[in-house]
Image (cartoon, coloured by chain):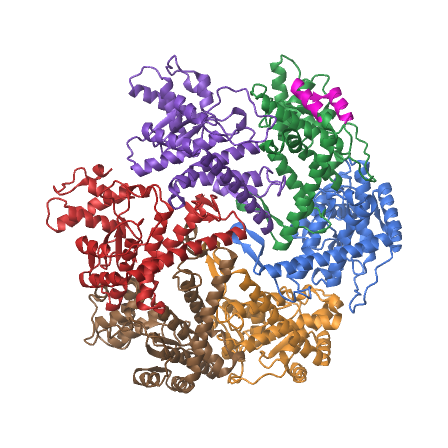
Chain colours: A purple, B green, C blue, D orange, E brown, F red
Amino acid sequence: MLKVHTKGKPLSEDVNLDIIAKLTPGFSGADLANAVNEAAILSARRSKKKIGMPELQDAIERVQMGGPERRSRVMTEREKLLVAYHEAGHAIVAGGMPKSFPVQKVTIVPRGQAGGYTLYLPEEDSLRYTTVSQFEARLVSALGGRLAEEIVFGPSEVTTGASSDITYVTRIARAMVTRYGMSEKLGPIAFGEKEELIFLGREISEQRNYGDEVAREIDREVHRIVAEAYERTREILTTNRDVLNDMASSLLENETVDGERLRELMARVKPMKETETLANGNGSNEPPIVIAPPM
Amino acid sequence: MLKVHTKGKPLSEDVNLDIIAKLTPGFSGADLANAVNEAAILSARRSKKKIGMPELQDAIERVQMGGPERRSRVMTEREKLLVAYHEAGHAIVAGGMPKSFPVQKVTIVPRGQAGGYTLYLPEEDSLRYTTVSQFEARLVSALGGRLAEEIVFGPSEVTTGASSDITYVTRIARAMVTRYGMSEKLGPIAFGEKEELIFLGREISEQRNYGDEVAREIDREVHRIVAEAYERTREILTTNRDVLNDMASSLLENETVDGERLRELMARVKPMKETETLANGNGSNEPPIVIAPPM
Amino acid sequence: MLKVHTKGKPLSEDVNLDIIAKLTPGFSGADLANAVNEAAILSARRSKKKIGMPELQDAIERVQMGGPERRSRVMTEREKLLVAYHEAGHAIVAGGMPKSFPVQKVTIVPRGQAGGYTLYLPEEDSLRYTTVSQFEARLVSALGGRLAEEIVFGPSEVTTGASSDITYVTRIARAMVTRYGMSEKLGPIAFGEKEELIFLGREISEQRNYGDEVAREIDREVHRIVAEAYERTREILTTNRDVLNDMASSLLENETVDGERLRELMARVKPMKETETLANGNGSNEPPIVIAPPM
Amino acid sequence: MLKVHTKGKPLSEDVNLDIIAKLTPGFSGADLANAVNEAAILSARRSKKKIGMPELQDAIERVQMGGPERRSRVMTEREKLLVAYHEAGHAIVAGGMPKSFPVQKVTIVPRGQAGGYTLYLPEEDSLRYTTVSQFEARLVSALGGRLAEEIVFGPSEVTTGASSDITYVTRIARAMVTRYGMSEKLGPIAFGEKEELIFLGREISEQRNYGDEVAREIDREVHRIVAEAYERTREILTTNRDVLNDMASSLLENETVDGERLRELMARVKPMKETETLANGNGSNEPPIVIAPPM
Amino acid sequence: MLKVHTKGKPLSEDVNLDIIAKLTPGFSGADLANAVNEAAILSARRSKKKIGMPELQDAIERVQMGGPERRSRVMTEREKLLVAYHEAGHAIVAGGMPKSFPVQKVTIVPRGQAGGYTLYLPEEDSLRYTTVSQFEARLVSALGGRLAEEIVFGPSEVTTGASSDITYVTRIARAMVTRYGMSEKLGPIAFGEKEELIFLGREISEQRNYGDEVAREIDREVHRIVAEAYERTREILTTNRDVLNDMASSLLENETVDGERLRELMARVKPMKETETLANGNGSNEPPIVIAPPM
Amino acid sequence: MLKVHTKGKPLSEDVNLDIIAKLTPGFSGADLANAVNEAAILSARRSKKKIGMPELQDAIERVQMGGPERRSRVMTEREKLLVAYHEAGHAIVAGGMPKSFPVQKVTIVPRGQAGGYTLYLPEEDSLRYTTVSQFEARLVSALGGRLAEEIVFGPSEVTTGASSDITYVTRIARAMVTRYGMSEKLGPIAFGEKEELIFLGREISEQRNYGDEVAREIDREVHRIVAEAYERTREILTTNRDVLNDMASSLLENETVDGERLRELMARVKPMKETETLANGNGSNEPPIVIAPPM
């Protein structure tokens, strides 16, 4: 598909389409065309005759996050401090969960509606089949932002910045219980018919087809799953408080942490112990990039 | 109906319309026309002057699964292993239930949205009247995929791949309780009026016309039925762990298991004991092919 | 009304319009016109110059059951056995209930969507006013099909074939409780406003205007009524197991049982004892034909 | 208003417009025009040159009951017996309640959808303000039909013929509790907002704006009110069983009971004792005619 | 605004626009124009060349009550007695509550749909801010009609005439609890989102956004508030039974009570004791007229 | 954005666009254009050739409050007293909460629908991220108006004037619990899917996707949060009763309190003690103006 959209565009020699493909999992054709056009415009602005690799990478993040970097947006010192610890929290916790996607980049440069964000590298096959342990790793990492705020600034200073993380966590936990049979208590049963209402043009979020007792059990299981994930998040963050501080400092200093500096910091994170599972290796060396819910 | 759609098409001598009819239970006229056209195209591609039997069979599966084989789709080793055990689970468990449809083919070649699938041969009359024991066999076989994952990879490594199996199981169990009077506790009573809303152009999934107490009883009966089926699934899979491994290996090696190899493997499955019933023989020798919910 | 629709049509001398009128209770003008036209076509096919009585009777059943006889539909032996016992169950149980409509014909020749059906002769006045005991007789007879399956083939071999019987039974029992004040516990009160929604063009199945406690009582009363009817059905069928077997055999042998053979079999059915009621005689000698919910 | 609609119509000398006005409470202008036209047609059929009083009276009943007398409709003996006792039940019970409207006419001649009906003479002012005791009298009289069936034919022979009585009784009892503050337990509070939905063009039956506890109390109060009315109905009917039988006989013999014969029968009814109330006299000598819910 | 609508109309010298302004609180421009036109017509009928003050006052009441006086409407003696005590009840109870609006006029002359009505003089500022004690006074006065019926005619003779009072009382009590935080138990929290549904063109009566427990507490608080108001109403009416009788007699004799006679009667009413509040005086001497919910 | 809307407009030299920007947080382009136009009109009325700073400030408040000052609106003395204490309550309580926005201006000059209002100066970053302690400060300040009424005039004299404060408080407390995970009991989970219904053109207030137990917990947490905030409000107001009185007096005397007089009064307010938090300083010296929900 990528070849279709780059056809006739002058590409720099350093552009590797295989890497671009891995950077754009879940992109539609329109997304790809959009990204290639953005890259062409960026290259022109930078007086390049051909579309370069840095321009393509920037254009891809721009499409993913819903807008360009907004370095002009003035952030107060307090905001920067908050966002730095929030994003560092996501990254450190991901580093502590063996089944988490590796972290690729952490930044407090605003982009779109987000004040900062963390980029993950998902394993290719997890896009088709996700395991219980992978879901747990996502839950824990998504909760890392809020918990970093709580640990660093105190419970009365946590912010509304975690609101999309909370929505994301809720959706995963509910889906585990109601769609994927991942709650032993409720069993391999689907709860709630998805109804695509024609006159609305899209899916309504679920048609409840069960009684109050089951509703209560679902709520309790969702609560239990999130609460257990929160405890793990706390365990990892308190164990790795020093790395958290160092990454936040690094973000305040450099705005973005990636490459060697990121590898050094992540290498210092002490991971959670986990029960061994059979299929935890995979051969893909350069997995595509996926983005966590932005703050 | 088949004769109408093949009229004027050059058919190879090996094409047996009776067999084709049995391969296409539940096909609409449009489905049939679609399949014949696909077969014509496939035959042309293979430089055949007439439509051959293999092309017809391939075209029928293509229509059933919503698309062609996708050998080009790259699957990681971990995915192949997962799908192999999942599909082998369906097949082995079907083999252990006397009232199950016989298994015809198991494959890990992706097709449409599915990463692999298992083909069953339904008995002709079960399309009109289904018994409690046949429903149980379908429940048990549908749960075989998820349980194989659990037994082989451990509870924390089960995947979202069972999601359509879970939907299928839930629908059968609810229908047994609410439409077919197959729960002794709730009796021969229908629960929930099906409402075809005109302004939506189709049926809405049920109009609840009962109180909370009945809602709770329905939920409990559905849970009981699925839980009992799950226990049977576990019993069959643990009893036949060696055949499960062998079928998964065979799938990893050959991608598809059918014919003689399939018969050999299925013959080794130790079946569940069941109470004898009066009407368990039927005269149809070559029943049509039906497909289990794909993974 | 009948005279309007037969005007100008050549009728055979054996056609008795009074009998036809009794054969078509509940027919609309369009239904009647439809039946007369069907009869004309059937007569023409049979090279008759006038519309005969047999053609009219066949056309009427065709309109009632939603289609012609489908002798070409291949049924397996197991299906025939199942349908024969199911329909025999309806008929035997009707014979055991004094307030039931007399049975006119039992058949396992498929028609429309049905694999077989039982024809009843309703008393004329019951079309306007139905008594508690007549409702009970209808419930018991409707349950006869399912219970015959259970008794003959065992509980795990009952089928989905009873699904329309179950819907029918539920509607009667709910109406007794919620519309006709026939539950002493709930009293002469109507529950649920029928709402005809204009934008849907038809009635929605009820607007709940009562609390959870009443909802529970309604559910329990419906359950009690159906459960008691089921017990009566069981009593009649076990008492008359031999006649059940003989009628099923007769159906397997002749496909249809009516006339003298039916009278002989029904005469052997031992009826339930019932309390005497005042008004149980009526003067109509040839009541119209009504059809039970088909299997 | 009446004068407008009779202007230019030749009226017989015996026509008294004041009486006609009292016969048509609640008539719209269209209803009146309709009745006058019907009377003109009836008079013409009877070769009268002017519209007579009997034709006007017949036309008014025709408009009220939704159609002409249907003497041609064949009723079985059992139906006649049933309707005679049902209507006699309404009349006798009305006679036993001091606050009931006086009965004007009882008939088993079918009209519109009804198999028979009872005409009452409402007091003029009750059209604007209705008291608790008047509501009770209406409840008791409406229940007289069903209870007469039960007493005469036995509980298992009561019919669906009381269905509109039951709806009527439910609406009165609910309105007493939820609109008119006539339940001491629930107090002078309105429950449920009436919502006139514009896109439906009419009122939806109520928007529930209270919790489960209140819903339960409303249900219990409605049940209590109807149950107490039913006990009064039973008391009056068993006390006056002989008059009930005589009125039913008279109906079977003459089809209609009114005038002197009605006065004689009603004079024999022993009334319920009631607490004296201040305002139970009224000066209107010839009140207009109102019709009870027909059977 | 008033000046705009009277511009170019010949006004009598006795017309005082300041008084008219106070007589029309809550009037829209259209209401005002309507009233002025009505007054012009009335004056013309009475052969006045200029619009007089009595015509303006009559026209204003006409607009408020939805129609002209209907002296021609025949009321029975019993109706007059009922309405006289009902309206006297409203007035006497208002007189007994210090925070009530003063009563301006009581009448049993029918107007619009009402059989009689009571006019209050609201304090100007209460149109913007209403206190708990003012709400209580309105509740008590609105309940005065029903309770007068109960005390005078007995509990079984209360009528449907209080139905709009009951709706009014319910709305105030619910608003105190759910919108204005005037229930200590539920606190300063709003319950139920008001939703203006666009496709209906207007507000739907509330979107419930709370659980069953809160629903129950709201119902109980509403019940408590109304029950306490009812007790106060009873206390005032039984204490002032003699004034109630005298005002009812006066109404039966003169149809309307106002001016000096009203002042005399109201002066005899013994008021409820109340706790002193800071801000219970106001400087407005001639407050505008407001109308209680008519009977 | 501001530069776009002032382009081509003659601005006085005292106009500082940076200050205007801070005065208009949350303004849309249309709001800005509206304010600039209003300022131009005001300047023209005051015979100024250029748009001045006072005119711009007035125009901005006019847009925020939905209309111009309404000095012509006659308020009774009682109303003025009420509004003065209500607004003083908001201001004093804000002064007692360290995390509250500083108060900029308090006035009892009516504007739009409001009888008076209080202007706050929000910290710039709080527009993006709000902390628990900032939400608490808003809750407490919003409740200051109602509680001032209660303390000064007594519980039975509190008014409907707090109705928009109550709505505001409810929305914040519910959002803390259901969107921002700020209730420890319910955890970092989102409750209720926001549904934007296309056929309504806007968001419906929430799709409940949880059971009764969670609904009850949400209600209880909302109640607890508001109740605790109310206690703090009470504590601050009773501690600072003298300042409350002085500010109310000042408002009655001067209608508006700001500048030096406001600073003097606020300096006398004794604040609540709070736990120290890390990030409670910020560098912005002239934060933009935000307006509390008007009375």
Left or right of C269 in this view: F202: left
Q: Quadrant of the C terminus of chain B?
A: top right
Kindly report the secondary structure that dominates the magenta region of the rendered protein.
helix
* Of D70 and D187, the residue lying toward us: D187
Residue beneath the point at 29% across and 44% down? F26
Please say whether residue F202 is visible from this viewpoint: yes
Residue beneath the point at 70% across and 65% down? D159
Q: Quadrant of the N terminus of chain B?
A: top right
Residue A35 in the image: x percent, y percent? 39, 24
Does the stretch in magenta take in B247?
A: yes
Please say whether residue A113 is visible from this viewpoint: no
Residue C48 in the image: x percent, y percent? 78, 42
Relative to F285, does residue B294 appear above or below in the rendering? Answer: above
Residue beneath the point at 30% across and 70% down? E38
Does the stretch in magenta take in E148?
A: no
Residue C223 in the image: x percent, y percent? 70, 56
Left or right of F241 in this view: B250: right
* Of E213 and D221, the residue lying toward us: E213
User: How many marks do you count on the picture?
Assistant: 0
* Of E38 and C247, the residue lying toward us: C247
Q: Quadrant of residue C102?
A: bottom right
Q: Quadrant of residue E54?
A: bottom left
Left or right of E292 in this view: F195: right
Residue extent of the magenta highlight: B244-268
